[in-house]
Amino acid sequence: MPNAKVLSQKQAVVAELTEKIQKCSAGVIVDYKGITVEEDTALRRECRSNDIDYSVVKNTLLRFALNNSGIEGLDDLLNGTTSLAISDDAVAPARVMAEYAKKLNDKFEIKGGFMDGKMVSLETVNALASIPALPVLQAQVLGTMLAPITGLAVVLKQIAEKNGAPADDAVEAEAAPAEEAAPAAE
């Protein structure tokens, strides 16, 4: 039986971990066995740049924190070396962890995850990982919205050129001498 000081420290860690899990949108549980210090440093840097809280956790403490948070079904995954990546962004932990799992092959393996207080399968984590980052999605939506307008502008330009309107190059060439003549008139 651990002494009172050690027990209170562990209870504090579980309480802090429980609070983090309850506040986050999603989390990914990872087996990190065998990664080097350089690989771990690069992973942590990537996690910080994506606002992901990444930490190595003891299986027993994580089990208590998950149970306190009402997330069930992950107990079987909590063995061996375990780390946890959590974030307010539901996609970021899955994307970053899957990217490193591909890079590091056998050294780094996703065990499973949770989202909005419920366990998700490994397949779901991998599906989330395939979703592009938010700025990429925003650019794709913007491109989709601008495509009809751009297409209309191209068609109108072709119609105008067909009806005798000068091409853009001719318009620019005609405008240049007029601009040069203006200062001479003063």
Image (spheres, helix red, strand yellow):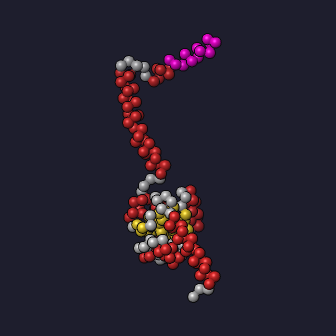
Please determine whether, in this image, residue 1 is positioned above or below residue 58: below
Residue situated furthest bottom in the rendering: 1
- Residue 123 x/y as whole percent: 38, 64
> What residue lies at 50% left-to-right and 17% top-to-bottom?
174
- Residue 50 x/y as whole percent: 54, 57
Residue 175 colored in magenta in the image: yes
> What residue lies at 39% left-to-right and 60% top-to-bottom?
127
> What residue lies at 47% left-to-right and 23% top-to-bottom?
169
Q: How many numbered marks are there?
A: 0
> What residue lies at 48% left-to-right and 65% top-to-bottom?
27
Residue 4 colored in magenta in the image: no
Q: Quadrant of the N terminus?
A: bottom right
Please determine whether, in this image, residue 159 is positioned above or below residue 60: above
Q: Is residue 56 visible?
A: no
SS majority, magenta: helix
Q: Is residue 157 visible?
A: yes
Q: Left or right? Give the position of 103 relative to 158.
A: right
Please determine whether, in this image, residue 72 is positioned above or below residue 165: below
- Residue 65 x/y as whole percent: 51, 73
Boundaries of the magenta span: 174-186
Quadrant location of residue 143? Answer: top left
Please determine whether, in this image, residue 173 is positioned above or below residue 52: above
- Residue 115 x/y as whole percent: 44, 64
Residue nearest the viewer, comparing 158 with 5: 5
